[in-house]
Image: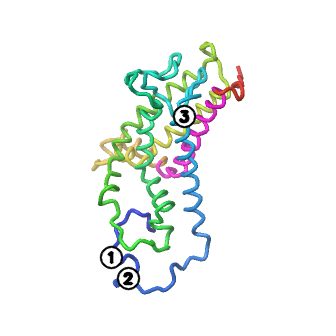
Amino acid sequence: MATGTEPDLDPAGGVRGASRAAIAARHLRTDRWWLSPALTAAGLLAFVVYSTWRAFGNAHYYAAPYVSPFYSPCLAENCVPMKGGPNWEIFGSWWGLSPALLILIFPLGFRLTCYYYRKAYYRGFWASPPACAVAEPHRKYSGETRFPLILQNVHRYFFYAAVPVAGILTYDTVLAFRDEHYAWGHMGLGTVVMVVNIGLIWAYTLSCHSCRHIVGGKLKHFSRHPVRYRAWQWAGKLNARHMQLAWASLISVAVADFYVYLVASGVFADPRFF
């Protein structure tokens, strides 16, 4: 099954090269093979449009005690004061743009170089390949061996950056168990949204192929490393659901941000359970 990451055996002529079987039909599939890549492209495009609007908006990202995951940690001097939150003024007043642009590069880079997302947008946007058993429209294909796609190899380094970001968002979730006056022991609908979001973010992050390799890679004898072996098995179970977790966490982070936006902009008040 082609995934869009294998170099073509006949790069000069692609699948229509002289060394390939001469099949007149573009493909032999009779199902709606185009539906999956089309839906994938539509879903990713919708998130790109939404996240771009929110990242450059620079407003309505904090509604005590909730902070949008797009803006945390807030690293600029122009950040909205967040009571108890990770508001670190590392960048001075010279940064006049949205503070979200300073932090989103890390989760964005992590997802952009993710093995599943690479397959998804290669197929959805570049038709490389459009689907299994459907020929590529491109005559030449070099895989990820040339610039700029060779930069996809930095995925594991983005994983190292994604882990502390997830840790900070976990801290934000703990702070969500307060009321608007910062008193502990309260929970609202926003708290539930934040808890579900951070759970999915951690599940997606730890299901990463790089994480699985870090905890169990380069081991010759699992029996000599029982703890790493158990962690490798656990990461492997998550990795089997990497695609589902990628989409679930993508949706949850957008929902969490939009919820904070609605509360911060005064559309409705956060319902409190206790």
Along the polypeptide, which appears first: circle 1 or circle 3? 1
| Three-letter code, disc 1 | Asp
For the residues labelled 3 and 2, the Cα–Cα distance comes to: 51 Å
Task: Choose top left, top right, bottom left or bottom right for residue 42.
Answer: bottom right
Q: Is residue 242 found inside the magenta-colored segment of the image?
A: yes
Location of residue 52 in the rendering, given as x and y in whole percent from the top left corner: 52, 42
Percent across and percent down for residue 179 are 64, 17
> What is the CA distance from the residue labelled 2 to the residue labelled 1?
8 Å
**Mark toward the start of the polypeptide (3 vs 2):** 2
Which mark is in front, 1 or 3? 3
Q: Is residue 124 magenta?
A: no
Please say if the residues under marks 3 and 2 sit with CB atoms less than 8 Å apart: no
34 to the left or right of 159: right
**Image quadrant where residue 29 sits:** bottom right
Q: Which residue is mark 3?
A: 57
Considering the image in quadrants, where does the C terminus appear?
top right
Q: Which mark is residue 10?
A: 1
Per the image, the residue denoted by label 2 is 20
Give the number of the disc on residue 194: none
Q: Position of residue 34 (x, y in %)?
A: 57, 67
Give the answer, above or below, for where 119 lies relative to 268. Answer: below
Q: Residue at x 58, y 52 (%)?
A: 43
| Camera-side residue of 68 and 199 | 68
Q: Secondary structure at mark 2?
A: loop
Q: Verify CB contact (< 8 Å) between mark 2 and mark 1.
A: yes
Q: Residue placed at 41% from the left, 71% from the top?
A: 138
| Bounds of the magenta segment | 239-264
Q: Amino acid at mark 3?
A: Gly
Percent from the top left, x then y, of residue 191? 62, 27
